Amino acid sequence: MTELEQRVASYHSSAQINDSIWADFGALTDSIPFLKAHRDWVEKNSFGFGDRAFHYMWYLILRDDVLRRPHPKLLEIGVYKGQVISLWALIANQLRSSVQITAISPFKSSKPWFTRNRLLNRAAQMIVRRYRDDVRSANLYNDEDYLDCIHRIFRQFQIPEANLSVVPGYSQDKHVYQQLSESWFDVIYIDGGHRYEQVASDLAMYSQRVTAGGYLVLDDASCGQPGSKFWKGHRSVSRAADDWGNPGFTNVLNVGHNRVYQRS
C-alpha cells in the first residue's frame, strides 16, 4: 500500500487529523530538498500563495498515483505566476517522468475598477459595501506580465515548457471551455475566480472532465472543516463546495484549505 493509499484509508475530517496533516505535510515538504527549494523561492520572490504543506500534497498525489498512469494530464484553473504548474513539472522531472500540463488563466490583472482608484465617490463606496463579499474573495492582483513570470519560474528550476499549454481567458468563458470540452484530465486544480457563481460554474463544468479515479482539488474551500492550525479559505468558495455536494466524487483528503476529491 502506498503512502497516499494509507493516508486516504485512515482519513476522516476531524480537527486533530486536519491539523496533524497540515503540520506533517509542511515538515515533509522541508524534508525533500527540491520541494523545499521550490517553496522557499516562491516565498522569497512572492510567486504564489497557499501553504508549504501543499507542496507535499502534490508530491504525494503525483508520486503515488498520477505519474504511474500512462500519459498523465493535469489542468490548473487560475495560474497566477506559475507556482503549481511549475511544481507539477518539477516533480515529474525529479521522478523521471513527464506530464502534459494545461493552464487556464487571464494572465493579467483582474482588479475591479474600484480598487484602482484611491478616491471613491459615494456611489462607488455604496457598491463596495453592497458587494463586500465579492471584493474580499476577488483576486486583486497587480498589473504584471504573468506569462513572463511563468517563463521565469520554469527557467529558475530548469524545467522545459514543451509539455505546457496555456489557454488565455476565464474558465467560464464559452470559447475557453470549448477548447477543453473533449479533453480528460487526471488532475484538475480549481483556483480561479472566487465568487460563489464562478466556483459553482467551475465545479459543474470541469468536474465532468476528470478521469475515473482522477482528482479534483479545490483551493480555499475549508471554512466548514474542523481544525485550528491553518487558514480555511473563503466563505464563497467553501459554500460553493458544500452546495456542489461532490456528485460522483469522494472527499478523500483535506490539506489545510485545499480539499481533495477523487472521482469514483
Image (tube, rainbow, N blue to C red):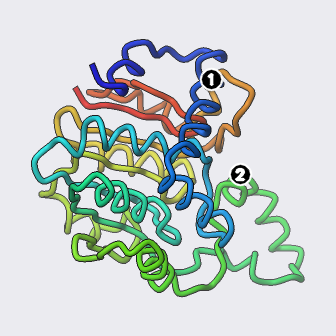
The disc labelled 2 sits on which kind of residue? Asp
- Front-lying residue, 69 or 171: 69
x then y, percent, for residue 40: 62, 60
x then y, percent, for residue 70: 10, 48
Q: Which residue is mark 1?
A: 20
Element at label 1: helix
Position of 227 with respect to 106 (left or right) is right
Q: Is residue 211 above or below residue 80?
A: above
Q: CA distance from mark 1 to mark 2?
A: 30 Å
- In the rendered image, the quadrant that contains the C terminus is top left
> Which residue is pictured at 36% across the width and 67% down the height?
104
x then y, percent, for residue 143: 62, 85
Q: Is residue 140 above or below residue 221?
A: below
Which of discs 1 and 2 lies nearer the camera? The answer is 1
User: Which of the two discs, 1 and 2, labels the residue nearer the N terminus?
Assistant: 1
Q: Which residue is mark 2?
A: 133
Place residue 27 in its image quadrant.
top right
Position of 76 with respect to 218 (left or right) is left
Place residue 117 in its image quadrant.
bottom right
- In the rendered image, the quadrant that contains the N terminus is top left
Q: Which dot marks residue 9?
A: none
> Which residue is pictured at 30% across the width and 24% down the height?
2
Q: Is residue 56 above or below residue 180?
A: above
x then y, percent, for residue 16: 65, 15
Q: How many marks?
A: 2
Mark 1 and mark 2 in contact? Answer it, CB < 8 Å: no
> Which residue is pictured at 46% across the width and 63% down the height?
78
Q: Is residue 85 above or below residue 118?
A: above
The disc labelled 1 sits on which kind of residue? Ser
